[in-house]
Amino acid sequence: PFRVLLGHALVRDEHGDEMHKSAGNAIWFDDAAEKMGVDVMRWLYCRQNPVQNLNFGYTPGREVERQVFNTLWNCYVFFVNYARLDEFDLSVPQVSVAERPEIDRWILSNLQLLVQLARVNFQAFNTPAVARGAEEFIEDLSNWYIRRCRPRFWRSKKTDDRDKLAAYQTLYEVLVTLCKLLAPIIPFLTERLYQNLKGRKAVECVHQ
């Protein structure tokens, strides 16, 4: 059924203590899946160096949800809300990368570096490198790219149309590519985002 099995040294509670039913610190899978979410659980495992003990619990799960998942979701919501208001059309010809502002080229360049990192490290089963690289990228996307580009999305359609189009096309490409890159780690969230970004007529799956 599989060729490679990747396990951790030990899985302990969030304080580093061994889990025991008698101690009351054991966490059952069904409970964690219901309260934390399976994608969050997968991220906790995948970002951990497997030769080291994994401290597993709801507090680390909330940190991942706040720092990674909520940030990614907010980037997606920002795009979707403004794209709907402006009736962003995917069929409009792309603004060439050379014509786009430096900040667009910067985030697209960082995206390609993340793609290269993911290809190399997924092949080597080094999921912590992919997860940590993605965390840094998502932070830059939210706190640098989107924050600095907000005025471009707010402009009237009658002014700076090409610059505004470049901003939409750049952010769309980043979000779709991120979904594809992170699908092996967080399959459920990425599938939801991917299908919504592609539209109701999308027939392909993010895992294809």
Image: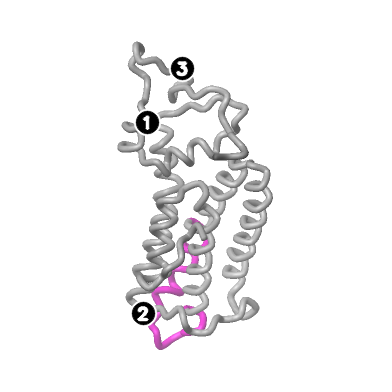
Q: CA distance from mark 1 to mark 3?
A: 18 Å
Check disc 1 and give the amino acid type: Phe
Check disc 2 and give the amino acid type: Glu
Residue 196 coordinates in the image, percent (x, y)? 38, 65
Residue at x-position 42% and y-position 68% = 203
Residue to which mark 2 is pinned: 87
Q: Quick one: 47 or 104, which is closer to the camera?
A: 47
Q: Is residue 58 left or right of residue 119?
A: left
Q: Is residue 143 left or right of residue 109?
A: left
Q: Are discs 2 and 3 less than 8 Å apart at CB? A: no
Q: Does residue 58 appear in this view?
A: yes
Residue to which mark 3 is pinned: 17
Residue to which mark 1 is pinned: 29
**Which image quarter is the N terminus in?**
top right
Q: Which residues are magenta?
A: 143-164
Q: Are discs 1 and 3 less than 8 Å apart at CB? A: no
Q: How many marks?
A: 3
Label 1 sits on a secondary structure element that is helix
Crowd tier of the residue under label 1, counting other residues whose Cα lies within 10 Å: few below 14, some 14–19, many 20 or above: few
Residue 208 coordinates in the image, percent (x, y)? 52, 60
Q: Quadrant of residue 65?
A: top left
Overall secondary structure of the magenta section: helix
**Most distant residue in the top direction:** 22
- Say whether residue 32 is magenta: no
Q: Nearer the viewer, mark 1 or mark 2?
A: 1
Q: Earlier in the sequence, mark 1 or mark 3?
A: 3
Check disc 3 and give the amino acid type: Asp
Q: Quick one: 84 or 118, which is closer to the camera?
A: 118
Q: Quadrant of residue 104?
A: bottom right
